[in-house]
Image (cartoon, grey):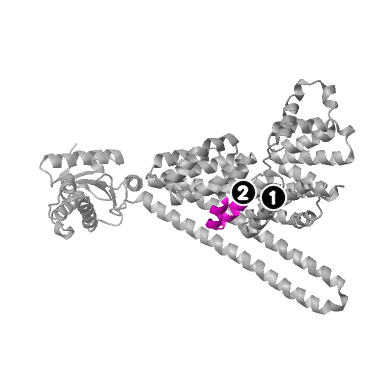
Amino acid sequence: MFFFKNRLNFFNTACLLFVGMLSFIPVSAIESQKLDEIFILAEEIKSTDFKKFSELVTFLSGQSDKLSPAQVEELEYLQSYSLVYSGERDESLVRLRHLAESSISENLKFKSYGLMINSLVLSRKYSDVFQYFDDFHNLLGKVSDESIRSYGFVIISLVFNSINQFDLGLYYAEKLIETTKVDRYRCIGMQYKVEALHRAKRYQEFYNFYEDAINNCIVAKQPVYVGIIRSFRIEQLVEESPQQALETLNAYFNEVEATSYKILITLYRALYSSIYLKLGQTDLALSYALAARDNLEVSEINYAVLRLYSALHEAAKISGDYQQALNFHEILVAKQKAFEDEKTSGLLAYNIAKANIEVKNQRIALLDKDNELLSLQKDLYEKEVKQNRLIMMVLASVLVLASFLAYRGMSGRKRFKKIAEYDQLTGISNRYHFNNQAKVALEYCEKNAKPVAVILFDLDYFKNINDMHGHAAGDWALQVVVKTCRNFMRNNDVFGRIGGEEFAVVLPGCQTDKAVLLAEICRDAIAGIDSTDCGKQFPLSASFGVCGSDTSGYQLKQLLADADNAMYRAKEAGRDQVMAFAP
């Protein structure tokens, strides 16, 4: 998250209003403004009014011939900030690296390292983050400006929270809260502390600190951080009390939308979707989730995106759209894997950087203590072996995790494929899968000039069974009818449930008269089913309609229509009969 969310105090607000009138003041009046004051104002408003900030940077760029060497460097830092905010991070990194290495000001070096690390965290380039992290951390002790030191604690806490090192993130967040005199930075520290406690599942400490964090951020006029802190509590309420979570969301959603902060708005909409799923309001859940998804970049990955796709998957599954559920599940698994891979790579980069620092320090110690050279070399070798073993263990863990996630993804795909293609009650093809399989069989028979027949049958008076004996008896009847009829079918016959109590069979290579015989066998077997096995007493029978390619062709739609016609003739003739289609 791009954390530079600033709010001006009363004096700075007055200055901002003054600058807002710059376009109406003659150029000579602008030039009379002290350049130092403009630099201070630009620093103050850079995260609250980016448009006005950009205008000030443009103005200062036009005054480059009047700037001191220190002001030239400060201007370059502000220009780099503008590039980061606008998404041009690669170009900003080149400028910031130059400033961090060559600036005459320790404070500006420190700020440049901080902005560079923040940009790399946003880009999820953790190996590069820890390339500069040690230098940044070392500079922290040399910074005299308390506000800039607070900024340093913000960056360090952000980095450790980003790689799931919540104990370290919490430690630096608490240091920030204890030492800063700036309301904005205290609010940021409280947000990082709340996040670390929430992600580490230290809920009692979270509850004790939550209200204090909210109140401090409200006083500091930091609505984005207020919204982020509330989101953690709402996440907990989704599981504990969905109705209370909904009331909290309704109370504060307008405030979140007013921030225009896309990631936070996406998270709140995803939370709405999760809540409505818990409350059984699937349509509303899907509506909020789809609205949030439409505002996302395809490559975007964060906690909000994972919650969003989890909600989309659950909503689609509950709605019975198993194909869409499968699609959302595949996206969710891919993003979960990418998210975990990022966290793992961040942790790996941190461990490698920490190991490299240890090796570096040990080598310096070797140069300073020649009389202990042999023993220190032995210690160094042993430590390097341990460090390499640690790296190998981390890499092996990554491989195992990746394999596990891949296995889960494949298993999930197979499971949802089965759900999408087969009738859960009877175990035979549903209407969608039956149509696909039947068309394949018909195309094969037509291409090879083979006959094909279709049987359509419907259980007689099935509604009476449900009404008089209950749906459990009706379900048992459907299952036992399918099991009975399957005994007389070949492996290549396509058998599917295409309606409530309506079934169809496509018989490749079968003449119509043979299909009529098979239908008669099935009819007789159904009539002989003993319903007392389910604890109820009722008769079972079915009416059959049969047609073949010799009269109806090879189009599934026509074959089903003609078989249906024959079946209804069987019903009209008294039910429990087999009728062949006659043109």
At x 87% / y 78%, what residue is drawn? 371
Q: Nearer the viewer, residue 23 or 463?
A: 23
Q: Compared with residue 370, is residue 499 higher up or lower down, i.e. above or below?
A: above
Residue 142, by quadrant, is bottom right
Q: Compared with residue 351, is residue 124 higher up or lower down, i.e. above or below?
A: above
Q: Position of residue 447 (x, y in %)?
A: 35, 45
Q: Position of residue 445 (x, y in %)?
A: 32, 47
Bounds of the magenta span? 193-209
Label at residue 154: 1
Magenta: main secondary structure: helix
Secondary structure under badge 2? helix
- How many dots with numbers? 2
Q: Amino acid at mark 1?
A: Val
Residue 323 in sight in this render:
no
Q: Position of residue 321 (x, y in %)?
A: 39, 44
Q: Position of residue 399 (x, y in %)?
A: 58, 63
Residue 83, by quadrant, is top right
How would you rate the neighbour count of disc 1 (Cα within 10 Å): few for under 14, some for 14-19, many for 20 or more? many
Q: Earlier in the sequence, mark 2 or mark 1?
A: 1
Q: Nearer the viewer, residue 227 or 75?
A: 227
Q: Amino acid at mark 2?
A: Gln
Q: Is residue 208 magenta?
A: yes
At x 69% / y 69%, what residue is drawn? 388
Q: Nearer the viewer, residue 108 or 552?
A: 108
At x 42% / y 44%, what residue is drawn? 243
Q: In the displayed structure, does residue 568 sit left or right of residue 205?
A: left
Q: Identify the residue under disc 2.
A: 191
At x 80% / y 33%, what residue is drawn? 38
Q: Is residue 192 magenta?
A: no
Secondary structure under badge 1? helix
Marks 2 and 1, Cα distance to the nearest angstrom? 10 Å
